[in-house]
Amino acid sequence: MERKRKKHKIKKKRSDPAAGKRRRGRPGVDRSQVLQTADQLSVMLPAFWPKLVKPLLAARSPGDVTRAFEVLGLVSTSFVPHWSELILKIIQDRRFPRVRAKAQRAFLADSLGAQGAVTFRRSREICAEERTKESHFIVRRDYYIECTCGYEGPALKGACPDCGTMQLAEDVLSVGEDSLT
């Protein structure tokens, strides 16, 4: 019996290595930008919500939404006509709050945060996730110390900033251990 020889395929080299490194799936949105837009809308909406709410809730088509915003004048250029269909879908959503004005404004602002790049449900989820992120955290703890070199004030990383000694911290730890036994 004869052995068959395997033929090796020669891989073609790409001319631009960055062109081949695309991420899989849908292109994402900038999460901080979604939250920033939602926050801006939540600041803007209370100013004209009393005039807007009744015609907006009565709207049955994107044209009705556009007419509801025409009452507002200059503000309407940022919302309609390019967001009219999206606003109509948001208002007709079964989860849209029907009674409380504050909840309605928050729902609409968070839903419009992504500006239609993702579904309005995902836009609200992104806003909620970004708001719950921990924005501040302790990087370093400083303690006030009194050193034998004459320095009195905050410690730098647990040591005296003038001479660098950590003797006081070690004495406190050893005293604490002795009291435990």
Image (spheres, rainbow, N blue to C red):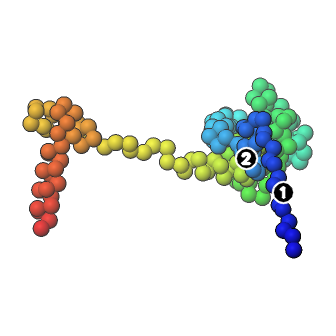
Which secondary structure, mark 1? Answer: loop
Asked whether residue 53 appears in the rendered view, the answer is no
Mark 2 crowdedness (10 Å alpha carbons): few <14, some 14-19, many ≥20: few
Q: Is 180 above or below relative to 132? A: below
| Lower sequence index among marks 2 and 1 | 1
Cβ–Cβ under 8 Å for marks 2 and 1: no
Q: Which three-letter amino acid code belongs to the residue tagged 1? A: Lys
Residue 50 placement: quadrant: top right
Mark 1 crowdedness (10 Å alpha carbons): few <14, some 14-19, many ≥20: few
Q: Is 147 above or below relative to 24? A: above
Q: Is 158 above or below relative to 149? A: below
**Residue at the image position 64 percent from the left and 43 percent from the top:** 31
**Residue at the image position 11 percent from the left and 56 percent from the top:** 175
Q: Position of residue 118 (x, y in %)?
A: 76, 47
- The extreme top residue here reads 74
Q: Is residue 111 left or right of residue 87?
A: left
Q: Position of residue 128 (x, y in %)?
A: 61, 51
Q: Nearer the viewer, residue 82 or 7?
A: 7
Q: Position of residue 58 (x, y in %)?
A: 84, 47
Residue 12 placement: quadrant: top right
Q: Nearer the viewer, residue 89 or 52?
A: 89
Q: Position of residue 40 (x, y in %)?
A: 64, 35
Q: Nearer the viewer, mark 2 or mark 1?
A: 1
Asked whether residue 141 appears in the rendered view, the answer is yes
Q: Nearer the viewer, residue 81 or 115?
A: 115
Question: Residue 7, labelled with which disc?
Answer: 1
Quadrant placement of the N terminus: bottom right
Q: Which three-letter amino acid code belongs to the residue tagged 2? A: Arg
The residue to which callout 2 is attached is 23
Q: Is residue 29 left or right of residue 76?
A: left
**Residue at the image position 11 percent from the left and 62 percent from the top:** 179
**Residue at the image position 34 percent from the left and 42 percent from the top:** 140
